[in-house]
Amino acid sequence: MSAVIYPKVALIGLGLIAGSMAHAMRRAGLAETITGYARSAETRKIAREINLVDEVCDSALEAARDADLVVLCVPVGVMGAVAAEIAPGLKPGAVVTDVGSVKAAVIEAVAPHIPEGVHFIPGHPLAGTEHSGPRSGFAELFDNRWCLLVPVEGSDPGEVARLTRYWEGLGSNVDVMDAEHHDLVLAVTSHAPHLIAYTMVGVADDLRRVTDSEVIKYSAAGFRDFTRIAASDPTMWRDVFLSNKAATLEILGRFTEELFALQRAIRTEDGDHLHDYFTRTRAIRRGIIDAGQDTDAPDFGRAVASKAKARTE
Ligand SMILES: NC(=O)C1=CN([C@@H]2O[C@H](COP(=O)(O)OP(=O)(O)OC[C@H]3O[C@@H](n4cnc5c(N)ncnc54)[C@H](O)[C@@H]3O)[C@@H](O)[C@H]2O)C=CC1
Ligand SMILES: O=C(O)C(=O)Cc1ccc(O)cc1
């Protein structure tokens, strides 16, 4: 039986996520033809050299023309402009989706450009790295990770089911969520933590009494993780914060309140407060591990496999 879900898939933006999708689509045979476009001529040249997709086009419109699925894989701040560019080439019945890290702002920017008869079903794979560009993608990126689909009003359930099968073919588990909730969940689990990592690395850089070489030489695991996250693409993350402003500010407000309380506990030597707080946070970590979601743990693959096995038994 053929594994093809969408005969022609167009990837707009050819970076980490589009590249990983191309590799994973080929691994599973989900498309017959993959076209692609990126704004920078250099990226298009590299994409051609490494044969990332079947055809690298010189415009987004050309790449999307007559595609069965168009995936917008550009920074969230330019999703609306790209949707306007491709709109005249979309065929009736085509599906347009995206992989942006923010959903409400992307829906607001993209939906007005989607022609009648074309299905718009936003999405967000919860998988990535600090790397970017056409050479950074790999087929396994989405394996055993969540992809959230965020159908808009009037999304065709049959098309949501088809896009779900596509993401499962890429290796993901799929959940459906509404845009506002998505943006709040991601503000807690991804956007605020990235901002905290950026800040912590900035603080270490500013602290003249500790040299940069000492920071690198003696960095313990926690700080190393911060430096990895703080090496993420500046354009992508600028756009994430500006597009998910309300939810990120709400979480950062709560964060600073708790930070002040911990600061006060240290100043007043309130050990009970610190101990109670750390006991609570430790339980949260244990909950994540029990749910089999600790992707850093050496046995993560095994935990996922045994849960999948348990589900089918
Ligand atoms: N990097 C990550 O870990 C994750 C990123 N995302 C989301 O995926 C999207 C893409 O991110 P990455 O692949 O990491 O970025 P990337 O920086 O690796 O690739 C972005 C691509 O978009 C192209 N581009 C930028 N502006 C354009 C425009 N106006 N027209 C056409 N092409 C344009 C760039 O040339 C580049 O090829 C973003 O919306 C991001 O929020 C989602 C999950 C994880
Ligand atoms: O590299 C990491 O630690 C990430 O957190 C990757 C990531 C970045 C942005 C997303 O919207 C989803 C996943």
Image (tube, rainbow, N blue to C red):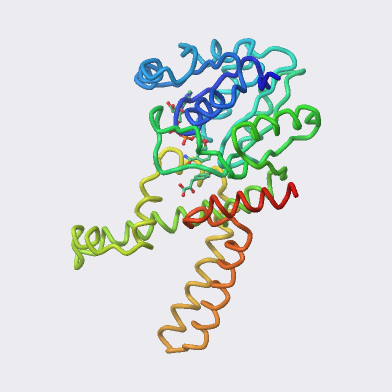
Which image quadrant is residue 43 in?
A: top left
- Height in image: 108 above or below 273? above
Q: Residue at x 68, y 18 (%)?
A: 2
Number of marks in the rendered image: 0
Q: Quadrant of the N terminus?
A: top right
Judge left or right: residue 101 versus residue 119.
left
Task: Please state the horizontal and vertical placement of residue 86, each as a whole percent of the image.
Answer: 59, 17
- Height in image: 122 above or below 181? above
User: Residue farthest to the front?
Assistant: 313
Judge left or right: residue 193 versus residue 122.
left
Which image quadrant is residue 122 in?
A: top right
Q: Residue at x 36, y 20 (%)?
A: 46
Name the foreground residue: 172 vs 181. 172
Task: Please state the horizontal and vertical placement of residue 102, each as a whole percent of the image.
Answer: 58, 42
Name the foreground residue: 152 vs 45. 45
Q: Residue at x 44, y 30 (%)?
A: 15
Q: Residue at x 67, y 48 (%)?
A: 308
Task: Please state the horizontal and vertical placement of residue 77, each as a whole percent of the image.
Answer: 52, 34
Task: Please state the horizontal and vertical placement of residue 19, each as a whole percent of the image.
Answer: 47, 28
Name the foreground residue: 103 vs 232. 232
